[in-house]
Image: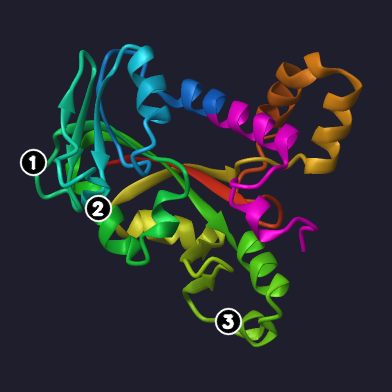
Amino acid sequence: MLPIPAEELNGSGTLGPYWTFYRAVAAEQLSRWLPQSPSTILDLSRGQGHWATQVARAGHRVVEMIDFRKAVDGQPVLRDADRIRQVRADDLRFLPDGSMDAVLAEDRAMSLELMAESAVADIARVLRPGGRALLCVDSLVLGMAILAEQNYWAHLRQTGEVMLVPWPDGSITRCFSSSQLRDLLTEAGLEVEWIRPRTVLSPSTVDHVLATDSRALAWLVSTELEAHPDDNDTVGIHLVASARRV
């Protein structure tokens, strides 16, 4: 198991150097994954704005879906910008079939969708033929670490198809093995291009290298992305997958 508290594992803790590295890896992964030509991209990454901004700065048009519960003072969360349009919605019914060139579901978005099958089927529906999806989910490594931290040993012995993990804050997420994530995507009609851990370098390794030389961040990111441990779900707290609509 990972010797890191739950509040650190979900990215909301104070393990500063590692999360700086993690975010740099995620940004570079997205940069390499984005289409070469200007495209229309749906962002389902929980309405944080960060991902939509990066995609827009790369020259793409973004439809960023904001959860309907995130209205402020009862006002709709809907705005238009030069390249980013935010839409308040709780599902994808507002989009016609085949209307998106790509779909981004970062920040563990599909792990927060306990009925991920329905969500991924919707993603496949709105993608044009040849369109691609990039998804990030919680891994079984993360799920088992969270259960062990809370002494849920009976849950660890269960071998069910779906692993739902209760967090100390009362939330529940869904964790995946690489084979479960592959099945989720293929059953929705998507062709998996690759599945890999977001990071394989440990927090202690990252901390040690950055403490030695703060300029080593770019080298660490390059080393991480060149590792390519495809379909290896024995390391890493999150899995990232790229899939294409055939």
The residue under label 3 is 159
Name the secondary structure under disc 1: loop
Q: Are marks 2 and 1 in contact (CB under 8 Å)?
A: no
The residue under label 2 is 69
Q: Position of residue 169 (x, y in %)?
A: 54, 66
Picture disc at residue 53: none
Q: Nearer the viewer, residue 53 or 120?
A: 53
The residue under label 1 is 96
Q: Which residues are magenta?
A: 1-26
Residue at image location 35% in from the left, 27% down from the top: 52
Identify residue type, mark 3: Thr
Q: Nearer the viewer, residue 129 or 153?
A: 153
Q: Quadrant of residue 17?
A: top right
Q: Earlier in the sequence, mark 2 or mark 1?
A: 2
Q: Residue reaching furthest bottom?
A: 154
Q: Are marks 3 and 1 in contact (CB under 8 Å)?
A: no
Q: Is residue 194 visible to the viewer in this orientation of the structure?
A: yes
Q: Earlier in the sequence, mark 2 or mark 3?
A: 2
C-alpha distance separating marks 2 and 1: 23 Å
Q: Earlier in the sequence, mark 3 or mark 1?
A: 1
Identify residue type, mark 1: Pro
Q: Is residue 203 above or below residue 187?
A: above
Q: Is residue 202 visible to the viewer in this orientation of the structure?
A: no
User: Which one is in front in this view, the residue at disc 2 or the one at disc 1?
Assistant: 2
Q: Position of residue 87 (x, y in %)?
A: 18, 37
Name the secondary structure under disc 3: loop
Residue at image location 51% in from the left, 81% down from the top: 160
Q: Are marks 2 and 3 in contact (CB under 8 Å)?
A: no
Asked if the stretch drawn in magenta spans residue 17, the answer is: yes
Q: Image quadrant for the C terminus?
A: top left
Residue at image location 32% in from the left, 48% down from the top: 190
Is 61 left or right of 203, judged from the image as shown? left
